[in-house]
Image (cartoon, helix red, strand yellow):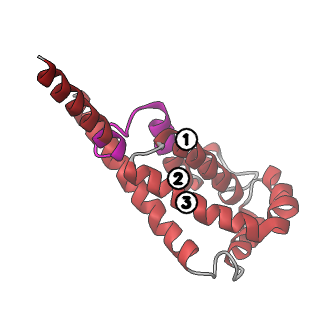
């Protein structure tokens, strides 16, 4: 059971990494998101009706005035999270950053309205809350143990120690 759980978390970690690399690719390699107004377009859409009320002043007074800088931070942050998930290096710090990022997006874009029933808050948040929960699981476990550079390095060091001990006998 333990091995299958580790494999499942590893497959999920790699899948999330691929998703983040796909999202980062057009932002990093193209200029529309970072310098062409793409980021500002999304923030303005959020302000027109998607943001939780407490996020509106943050988006309007902090994010928009620094839009180009924050767009680059988003683009390269997604790239870094994707690479960490795929390689298995720095998974926990990347997961904490990913969880903060997903919660920021959730509160910036998934507000169902002041009079919505409680269940609609959860339904509206699925595109961000599911990934936030994945990052939470990665941060609280060891998904980098399998199929990762970290795991390969650890196994290599273990083989070297065993070889060294065998030669010393």
On the image, the x and y values in percent for residue 105 come to 65, 56
Determine whether the residue tagged by mark 1 lies in a helix, strand or loop.
helix
| Residue at position x 50%, y 39% in the image | 92
Image mark for residue 126 = 2
Tell me if residue 55 comes above or below residue 27 in the rendering: above
Can residue 82 be seen in this snapshot?
yes
Query: What separation in Å lies between label 2 and label 1 (alpha carbons)?
Result: 23 Å
Image mark for residue 78 = 3
Q: Are marks 2 and 1 in contact (CB under 8 Å)?
A: no
On the image, the x and y values in percent for residue 119 come to 58, 45
Query: What separation in Å lies between label 2 and label 3 (alpha carbons)?
Result: 19 Å
Is 98 left or right of 84, judged from the image as shown? right
Over which residues does the magenta segment extend?
Answer: 133-152
On the image, the x and y values in percent for residue 103 come to 63, 48
| Residue at position x 74%, y 73% in the image | 40
Q: Residues within 10 Å of mark 3 (few under 14, many from 20)?
A: many
Please state, as top left, top right, bottom left or bottom right, where the C terminus lies in the image.
Answer: top left
According to the image, label 1 marks what residue?
Answer: 93
Image mark for residue 17 = none
Query: What separation in Å lies between label 1 and label 3 (alpha carbons)?
Result: 13 Å
């Amino acid at each position: 059971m333990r091995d299958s759980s580790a494999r499942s978390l590893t497959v999920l970690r790699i899948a999330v990494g691929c998703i983040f690399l796909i999202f980062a690719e057009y932002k990093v390699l193209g200029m529309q998101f970072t310098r062409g107004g793409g980021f500002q377009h999304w923030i303005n859409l959020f302000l027109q009706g998607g943001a939780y009320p407490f996020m509106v002043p943050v988006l309007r007074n902090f994010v928009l005035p620094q839009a180009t800088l924050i767009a680059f931070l988003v683009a390269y942050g997604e790239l870094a999270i994707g690479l960490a998930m795929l390689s298995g290096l720095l998974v926990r710090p990347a997961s904490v950053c990913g969880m903060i990022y997903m919660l920021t997006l959730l509160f910036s874009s998934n507000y169902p309205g002041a009079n919505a029933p409680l269940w609609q808050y959860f339904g509206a948040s699925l595109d961000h809350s599911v990934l936030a929960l994945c990052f939470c699981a990665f941060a609280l476990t060891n998904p980098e143990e399998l199929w990762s550079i970290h795991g390969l390095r650890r196994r290599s060091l273990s083989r070297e120690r065993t070889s060294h001990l065998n030669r010393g006998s």
